[in-house]
Image: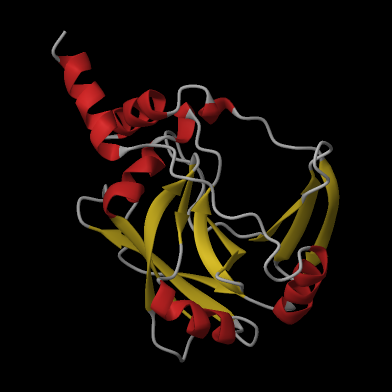
Amino acid sequence: MSRLAAILLLLAAPGAILSAPGALAQADSFGPWLLTCTTDRMTDATDCRMLHRQPVQPAAPGQAALTLEVTERNRRLVPVVTARDLSLEGAARGVLALTGSAQLRFPPNRLFDMPCALEGVSLVCAPREADLARAAAELPGADRVLIRITGLLVPRDQAMAEPVELRLSDTPAALARLRARVPEGLAAPPPRPGLDLWDVLDRLRRLLER
């Protein structure tokens, strides 16, 4: 399965998966949160990542690390689970984009599902439109979060029987700094998916028929 995922990503975006990170402009720490911002020297556009230090799932052979981030969706700052800048070494995470989702819960509130998809060459599991307001409202005051990876046909080594618990603190301060760096509505929109599934499957079929 991991070999198939690698082939899918290679066929879809053979050059993009080798992208290099931008120059780090500034980094700030707030409890378990790390806020890093980079500036595009050509456009002066600023891009920030608010990342939890503890991974949801650590990196493993063939699998990039899954991490908890905060990003803007429809003008709201919400939690997402990501595997950024997939390379061939971590391409097995691409399977989650086909059938996977992340369950996220801020106890004692009820959980919500976050379907996974590819954005550019990154895997991002984000709340549905109907859950954005609740996710944004519950995040600042939460002292912990539970996350579980599920999905039809998700490989056993990527699914979770028990949720991972991450402790949260200083979240309002981190959110305020993120908003100061990237005001509401000015965040770059999510990049288009790095693959067209039907096109990739057709190319894979033709490759195997040779």
25 vs 206, left or right, is: right
Please state the horizontal and vertical placement of residue 196, each as a whole percent of the image: 33, 37
Q: Identify the residue at image location x=57%, y=72%.
A: 78
Q: Position of residue 58 (x, y in %)?
A: 51, 49
Residue under the image location 32 percent in, 43 percent down: 95
Residue 35 is drawn in which quadrant?
A: bottom right
Residue at point 20%, 27% (across, down): 202
* Residue 76 in the image: above or below residue 25: below
Q: Position of residue 104 (x, y in %)?
A: 43, 73
Q: Quadrant of the C terminus?
A: top left
Where residue 199 sits, quadrant-wise, is: top left
| 207, 170: nearer the viewer | 207
State the colouring used for the structure image. Answer: secondary structure
Q: Is residue 173 visible?
A: yes
Please tell me whether residue 131 is drawn above or below residue 198 in the rendered image: below
User: Of 112 and 169, which appears nearest the observer?
Assistant: 112
Q: Return the x and y of residue 57 as percentages of the image width and height.
A: 48, 54
Please tell me whether residue 1 is drawn above or below residue 7 in the rendered image.
below
Residue drawn at point x = 28 percent, y = 30 percent: 200
**Residue 140 left/right relative to 10:** right
Residue 157 visible in the picture: no
